[in-house]
Amino acid sequence: MSDDADIMKRLSEYADQLQDAQYKQMREHITTQAAEITRFRARVAELEGALKDAAASVKEWGAYASQYLQDKWDLPGEVARYIAVAEGKNDAAREGKKE
């Protein structure tokens, strides 16, 4: 084999190794990101559940307030907004929020 052919062969092998290393690095990055997404989705589900539980608690505790205070602070509306946020209906929650 000529020197040029040997050099080209070694360069080609080196390029393949680099490409494999780059693909390996990309795969590792993608795998890491996929694990993060899974972790974040689980956390979001946990927080949605906690927010729904909190809304139920507010509704239960608010029942002890007088009707005047429930109306003044719009207890049913507040509970509905918390539930809307927990269910991902953020636009509905923002539209119902009093400024």
Image (cartoon, rainbow, N blue to C red):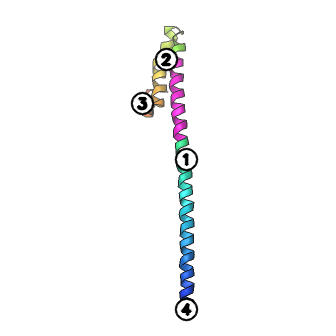
Please state which of the two labelled residues, at mark 1 or mark 4, is closer to the viewer.
4
In the rendered structure, which disc, 2 or 3, sits on the residue that comes first in sequence?
2
The residue tagged 1 is: 35
The Cα–Cα distance between marks 1 and 4, rounded to whole angstroms, is 49 Å
In the rendered structure, which disc, 1 or 2, sits on the residue that comes first in sequence?
1
The residue tagged 2 is: 75
The amino acid on which the numbered mark 1 sits, given as a three-letter code, is Ala
Residue interval drawn in magenta: 40-58
The Cα–Cα distance between marks 4 and 2, rounded to whole angstroms, is 86 Å
The residue tagged 3 is: 92
In the rendered structure, which disc, 1 or 4, sits on the residue that comes first in sequence?
4
Q: Nearer the viewer, residue 60 or 6?
A: 6
The amino acid on which the numbered mark 3 sits, given as a three-letter code, is Ala
| Residue 2 badge | 4
Q: Position of residue 11 (x, y in %)?
A: 56, 80
The amino acid on which the numbered mark 4 sits, given as a three-letter code, is Ser
Q: Position of residue 96 (x, y in %)?
A: 44, 26
In reply to whether residue 33 is colored magenta, the answer given is no
The residue lying furthest to the bottom in this view is 2
Q: Position of residue 76 (x, y in %)?
A: 46, 18
Give above or below for 90 relative to 6.
above
Q: Nearer the viewer, residue 46 or 81?
A: 46
Please state which of the two labelled residues, at mark 4 or mark 2, is closer to the viewer.
4
Q: Nearer the viewer, residue 79 or 9?
A: 9
